[in-house]
Image: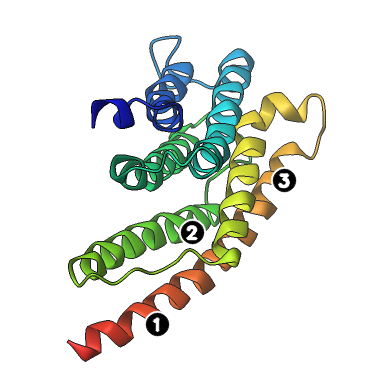
């Protein structure tokens, strides 16, 4: 049991969870929430590495036949922690000129509400021994979401190198939010059939 809990795929998942406070720390390097260029590039680097582990842990677990219950449980939790933390940081950052503010907050709210809804639905269905598989569109949603957050983490620091960095991030965030609405509805519709049967 202990050996399976500490195999490489699970260690990558644990590393992704540990990346969450590190991303937060980047924004608080000066003792308050402030997004200096150094903070943004540091947060982006950690986020990109963490996002790569999201692909690697699942791939290696399947390839090496090292899938485990703890891995299946923690993998989606790690993803949600990382995404939610980054969205909240970007929304709270008052120095984030043109970032997640105003109407763009709705995109972040849609994404976060969908994650909570689907998590609750999965938990309920798990008690009924019903599995709701991840769709291909949901995987695309996650990919778009991760790329959007990466652009937004670079934000004003990235704009100095490529002026449209923040705008691309916001457009991708809205695309992710729209796909999120559809996949969330899809999951809910699939789960509702089992709920109604009960």
In the image, which disc is placed on residue 106?
A: 2
Whole-number angstrom distance, CA of label 1 to CA of label 3: 33 Å
Name the residue rendered at 65%, 32% in the picture. Answer: 155
Count residues near mark 3 (Cα–Cα under 10 Å), then give few for <14, some for 14-19, many for 20+.
Answer: some
Q: Is residue 44 visible?
A: yes
Question: Disc 1 marks which residue?
Answer: 189
Question: Disc 3 marks which residue?
Answer: 167
Q: Is residue 25 above or below residue 87?
A: above
The image shows residue 118 at horizontal and vertical percentages of: 35, 64
Question: Quick one: 126 or 105, which is closer to the camera?
Answer: 126
Helix, strand or loop for disc 2: helix
Question: Quick one: 45 or 91, which is closer to the camera?
Answer: 45
Q: Is residue 16 above or below residue 124?
A: above
Name the residue rendered at 39%, 80% in the picture. Answer: 190
Whole-number angstrom distance, CA of label 3 to CA of label 2: 16 Å
The image shows residue 192 at horizontal and vertical percentages of: 31, 83
Residue lying at the far front of the rendered structure = 65
Is the C terminus in the top left, top right, bottom left or bottom right quadrant?
bottom left
Name the residue rendered at 29%, 68% in the picture. Answer: 121
Is the N terminus in the top left, top right, bottom left or bottom right quadrant?
top left
Q: Is residue 121 above or below residue 62?
A: below
1 and 3 marks in contact (CB < 8 Å)? no
Count residues near mark 2 (Cα–Cα under 10 Å), then give few for <14, some for 14-19, many for 20+.
Answer: some
Question: Quick one: 186 or 6, which is closer to the camera?
Answer: 6
Residue 96 in which image quadrant: top right
Q: Is residue 96 visible?
A: no
The disc, 1 or 3, on the residue closer to the chain's N-terminal end is 3
Helix, strand or loop for disc 1: helix
Whole-number angstrom distance, CA of label 2 to CA of label 1: 23 Å
């Amino acid at each position: 049991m202990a050996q399976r809990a500490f195999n490489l795929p699970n260690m990558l998942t644990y590393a992704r969870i540990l990346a969450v406070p590190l991303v937060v720390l980047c924004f608080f390097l000066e003792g308050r929430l402030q997004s200096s260029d150094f903070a943004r590039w540091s947060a982006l680097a950690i986020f990109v590495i963490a996002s790569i582990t999201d692909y690697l842990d699942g791939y290696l677990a399947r390839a090496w036949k090292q899938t485990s219950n703890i891995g299946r449980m923690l993998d989606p939790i790690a993803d949600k922690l990382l995404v939610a933390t980054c969205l909240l940081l970007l929304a709270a950052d008052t120095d984030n000129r043109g970032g997640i503010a105003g109407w763009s907050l709705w995109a972040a709210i849609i994404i976060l509400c969908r994650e909570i809804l689907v998590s609750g639905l999965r938990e309920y269905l798990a008690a009924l021994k019903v599995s709701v598989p991840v769709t291909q569109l949901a995987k695309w949603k996650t990919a778009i979401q991760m790329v959007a957050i990466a652009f937004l983490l670079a934000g004003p620091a990235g704009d100095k190198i490529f002026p449209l960095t923040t705008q691309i991030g916001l457009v991708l965030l809205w695309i992710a939010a729209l796909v999120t609405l559809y996949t969330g509805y899809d999951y809910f519709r699939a789960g509702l059939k089992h709920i109604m049967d009960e």
